[in-house]
Image (cartoon, rainbow, N blue to C red):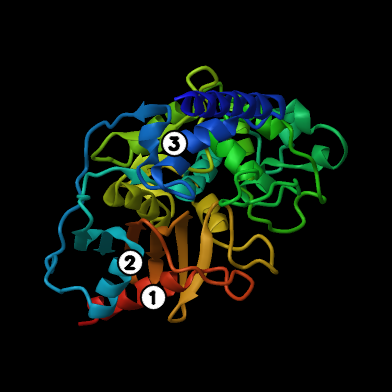
Amino acid sequence: MKFLKKTFKFIVVLLVLTVAVLYITDTDYLIKAVRTIYMKGHTTAFLEDYKEFDNQQIDIATPQPWPNHKDYNTVAETSELESIHTATGTIAFVIIKNDSIWFENYYDGFNENSKSNSFSMAKSYVSGLMQKAIQDGYIKSLDQPVCDFLPAFCEGKAAKMTVGDLSSMSSGTNWDEAYYSPLSITTRAYFDDDLAKVMNGLEMETDPGKSFKYASGDTQMLAMVIEKASGKKMYDYFEESFWKPLGAENETLWQVDSEDHDLVKAYCCIASNAKDFARYGKLFKDHGKWNGRQILDSTFVAKSVKPRFSDSPQYGYGWWLASFDEKEVFYMRGHLGQYVIVIPEDNVIVVRLGHSIEKSNPDIDPHSADFYSLLFEAYEMLNK
């Protein structure tokens, strides 16, 4: 009994000391990481982790359901596509042809209205909100200095950083995009309850506006710029600019760092479903117009889906860029293989949401192997 008491006391003391060290070293965000992710058996963020965080609700207006195509669900998935779904844990797969649902299927207990984490697909929305802020007169142009809104970036190289640099992932900061390291700034940003403090602590690594470097911090800073410029919370601006006008059928949630600071995790974390995510892809396919209303400037839409830097043809302003079967493709992309893929030439949108993805080497190809496989199998179905 004495041994058990001593062991219990030792464990308690060890836990207290561990917590104290985390607070002293300013790594106490790891407590939330352990509680919400690691103790649940995950090594990184997961699809339904929004339930473990603070969120702000984004409401709908008048729903505009997608019509079903005349050939709706008449073609079965290919055996290879079924294998991909099984291997990677797909929860939703939707093909939209000529603005109608041509095929849809859901898996693993999810359905057409189930929420799941967008992860970095949210970046495309934030880039669009930047353009909306320009149209509304809150921001002068893509060339306006970030310093005009964020005083922490007014010295040295940072003073040259523009709003457009944030949207095109060329801030020049020392952000480290590491999802699986508990000590990376990416992990800190995901779990810290004061995101603004984390962002304002970034330092410059290179001159801004010179080259592409994927950095979630760029999108987070862009959201802070938009909030400062507009005087509106991002989730409210998102609701009035996109979610309601595009006729979403389901209310959605956007994670915030904490109730006290109420700053959205702008680089990620909009919880919604495949068909509502797809609406934003249709908006860009249709040059910023929705049901006859010009929501986003068509010139900006065209600029967004073209590379800013010739040596980084895979990225524009908030959108990933690729080619498939000699067709131009642009797409929203999120951690673990969340996709809204737009093929304008064929008037096709492919949406895939899921638990994981087949990893590939970004030094060889910035697009995952599954990205190509999903498109190939979707077209095998379409061409039957």
Q: Please name the residue that numbered disc 1 is placed on.
A: 373
Tell me the element at label 2: loop
Neighbours of disc 3 within 10 Å: few (<14), some (14-19), many (20+): some
Residue holding disc 3: 36
Q: Amino acid at mark 3?
A: Thr
Q: Identify which residue is drawn at 54% across, 31% down.
A: 31
Q: Amino acid at mark 1?
A: Ser
Q: Is residue 265 visible?
A: no
Q: Is residue 153 left or right of residue 8?
A: right
Name of the residue lying farthest toward the right: 156
Residue drawn at point x = 40 percent, y = 62 percent? 341
For the N terminus, the quadrant is: top left
Q: Percent x, y for residue 38?
A: 47, 43
Numbered badge on residue 347:
2
Residue 259, position in %: x, y?
47, 19
**Sequence-earlier tag: 3 or 1:** 3
Q: In which quadrant is the C terminus drawn?
A: bottom left
N-term mark: 3 or 2? 3
> Is 137 in front, or is 211?
211
